[in-house]
Image: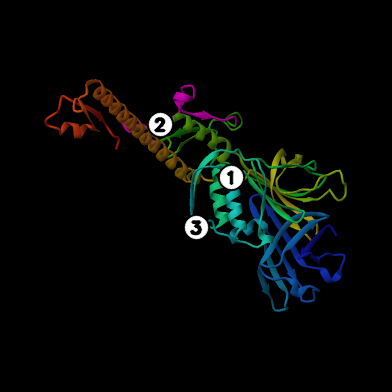
Amino acid sequence: MIYRILADGIPIFDYDYPDMVLLNPVLETEVNVSGSLDFIMPARHVFYNNIMMLNTDLDVYEGDKLIWFGRPIEIKTDFYRQKQVHCEGALAFLNDSVQEYHEYTSISIRDFFRKIIATHNSQVEKNRQFTVGNITVPDKKVYRKLKYEQTKDVIDRQCLNAEGGYLFVRRENGINYIDWLQELPYTCNQPIKFGLNLLNIGSNVGGTEIATCVLPVGDADETTKVPLTVESVNNGSKIIESEAAKTYGKITKAVTFEGVVKPETLLKDGQEYLSNLQFDKIAIECDASELHFLNGEYEQFMVGQVIRCVSDPHLVDRELPLTKISYSLDTGTKQITLGTMPTQELTEIVAEKTDAEAQEAVDEVEDTIDGLQDDVDELKETVEELVEEEKERTGDANLYKHWVGQLWQYNKIEDKDEHTIYFVYENEK
């Protein structure tokens, strides 16, 4: 049989053995989601008592390839003593730990991810730990503030939502690896094609929120009260146009980016909104037969691949990312979802960036204040040196004195001494 399920290394689903049959075994895998495994275990199953909630390690193999691993999180028994078992994938292990309260004012985003995983590993059993594998997300210095919250929530909010990318888990030589990748990592030479392996197809293209042009709006100027736009950095135009306008026509929407005060930042956010956040929402769901086991030249379907889908009767011929697979393990068929990844709402993106941008502004002000204080200290030393030199030259210790203070303090001095050097500065509030 193509598919096998192991529980703590022991086969519990294999059609070659009558005592190892499960009913309706269905595996769901999806990009950036832990996925699930559901099955019914008959009362006569030889390993009926081997499934323990949360504790048993379950592995699903397609041929000799491990395609999913996880654990049972719900077990129900019906009137006939059949066990209905629901399992979650390995990414859900990250819900077993809590991050410590900590503030990073400037940390590499990759080091931040590694620290999160290290904290998780310190709180869980070895079989629930991860070794950080490949990270291809661009590295940069970021501000991050951790609260007492689940590790999975932190990664979703402060890594995936804020920086993008895809999480993949894998097991090699008994070690659980977690990768954070900027792009989908796999290619596949097996197409989904009408007359070859396509059994059923349906599509869903969302156009209600499509915009091919965007007019980004930032914060209003404090003096003029006029909102910031991008014409100063966009060839005199307030509107950013995407390549999609050639296909769908010009569809313009105004989008407000709160907290943005620089036109360069506003332009970048507008371009990102057009290219990544909302354009071309398309999903194609199809039932396909796996050809790999009939012809070894074809690669197996797996989540994270880019697949070519061709069906002339349905006017479909394009490459799309494979974002979800539903496996019917007893029949060997797969329901495949191709299409753009679920988009994040603009308000969520803004919320993720707010803390970092606010902290950067605070850091800039603090650096300015520190610089002013250094200047004041340096001038104080200069004045003191001049006074000492004058004392040595004239022998009069009282010839010159010096005073340092703010303007309002200086103005309150009624009798100013001609033998005093007054250094006046203004301190920004």
CB-based contact (under 8 Å), mark 1 and mark 3: no
In the picture of the structure, the residue carrying the numbered disc 1 is 111
Q: Quadrant of the C terminus?
A: top left
Residue 270 visible in the displayed image = yes
Q: Where is residue 171 drawn, in percent x and y?
A: 74, 54
Tell me the CA gap for discs 1 and 3.
19 Å
Secondary element at tag 3? loop
Q: Where is residue 225 drawn, in percent x and y?
A: 33, 33
Secondary element at tag 1? helix
From what the image shows, is residue 262 above or below residue 177? Answer: above
Q: Residue furthest left?
A: 415
Q: Find out whether residue 30 is within the magenta segment.
A: no
Residue 250 lies left or right of residue 62; in this view the side is left
Q: Amino acid at mark 2?
A: Leu
Q: Where is residue 313 drawn, in percent x and y?
A: 75, 41
CB-based contact (under 8 Å), mark 1 and mark 2: no
In the picture of the structure, the residue carrying the numbered disc 3 is 148
Q: Which label is found at residue 228? A: 2
Residue 160 visible in the displayed image = no
Could you say which is closer to the camera, residue 300 or residue 419?
419
Residue segment shown in magenta: 219-243
Q: Quadrant of the N terminus?
A: bottom right
Residue 400 lies left or right of residue 307; in this view the side is left
Q: Where is residue 182 drawn, in percent x and y?
A: 64, 41
Q: Residues within 10 Å of mark 1 (few under 14, many from 20)?
A: few
Q: Amino acid at mark 3?
A: Tyr
